[in-house]
Amino acid sequence: MSSTAEETVVEPKAETTTIGKKKVEKTGNLILDIAHEVESLTKTKALNLAENLAENIEVNYFKLGGVLAKINENSWFEGFNAFDDFVYERYGFAGRKARYLISIYDNLVTKQIPWDKVSHLGWTKLKDLAPHLTLENVDEWVAKAEKATVVELQAMLKATKGDEGEEKTQKTTDDVVKMTFKLKPDQAEAVTQALAKAKAELQTEYDTVALENICAGYLGGTIAANKPFSLDEVIESTGFEPMLKRIAELFPAYDITVAPVEG
C-alpha cells in the first residue's frame, strides 16, 4: 500500500518596516519601499541623500520629504539654530517648503495612498490635499484637483466640513498682519499707479504681492526714492536665476519651473 505524504507549504513572512508607531509590510509599492529606505538611513547617508534629492525637488519631492523628516526627527542639523535655517543654508529652499514636503510624505505613507494615483498632481497641490486624503476619497479628490488651480483647490478643501461642521483640513495660509495708511489724494494716486504697474509686470492680481516686490526692491537698493519702480532694473541687478529662486521661495503655492530654450 502506498501513501502520499502531505506537503506543508510555509509562506515566508512579509518584510515589515516601522513608520512612526505603525508597522507596515513591504509589498513592492513605491511609497512603502521608500519609507523602508528612509527609516534605515544613517545620519551621513540622510544628509547626503537629501542634498542629491534637493537638486531636483519637483521630481524627488516625496522621497525628499521622508529624508527631511528623518533629519528633523533626529535633530541632525548641528551647527544651525533651527531646522529651517539648516534647510535654507544647506539645500537652498525655505523651511516652510520643507515642512510641506514632510507633511506629504507622512500623510501618504501613513494612509498608504497609492503613489500612481497622486504623483501627477505635483507637490504644490499635494501639500494641501494630502492631509485630507483617505483610501476611500482619493479618487474623488484627485479628479477635483486635476481640474483646479492651487488656489481653487485650497478653497474647496476649506469649504469641506466634517460631520459636526468642523473644518477637517489643515491651515494652509500664514497669519495675516493688517496695516492701515492714511494718504493724501496725490499720494494715493501715486501708490495706485505703482501697484497697477507692478501687478502688470509681475503678472499678479494681488496688491499685496505687488507691494511686497516694490518694497523688496527698495530695501535691496535697486529702487531709488526719486525714480519710478522698474522691474527690469530689479531683475538686471539681482540676476535671472536668483530672482526666480526668491520668487519660488516667497510663493511656494505656485509650481515654478523654467528651462532654457532648445534649439
Image (tube, grey):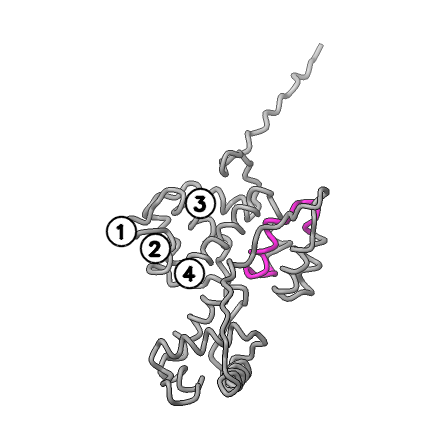
Any part of residue 263 in sight: no
Residue at the bottom extreme, as displayed: 227
Quadrant housing residue 92: bottom left
Q: Tag 4: residue type?
A: Ala
Q: In this view, does 137 lie to the left or right of 105?
A: right
Q: Tag 2: residue type?
A: Phe
Of label 4 and label 3, which has the lower sequence position? 3
Any part of residue 199 in sight: yes
At mark 3, the secondary structure is helix
Vertical comparison of 46 with 94: above or below? above
**Which mark is in front, 4 or 3?**
4
Specify the segment rendered in magenta.
Answer: 120-138
Find residue 94 and name its label. 4
- Residue designated by label 1: 79
- Residue designated by label 2: 86
**Which mark is in front, 2 or 3?**
2
Of label 2 and label 4, which has the lower sequence position? 2
Q: In this view, does 162 lie to the left or right of 25?
A: right
Contact, mark 2 vs mark 3 (Cβ under 8 Å): no
At mark 2, the secondary structure is helix
Instruction: Find the distance from the CA under tag 2 to the CA under tag 3.
Output: 19 Å
Contact, mark 4 vs mark 1 (Cβ under 8 Å): no
Contact, mark 4 vs mark 3 (Cβ under 8 Å): no
Task: Mark 2: give few (<14), some (14-19) or many (20+) Cα within 10 Å.
Answer: many
Of label 2 and label 1, which has the lower sequence position? 1
Contact, mark 2 vs mark 1 (Cβ under 8 Å): yes
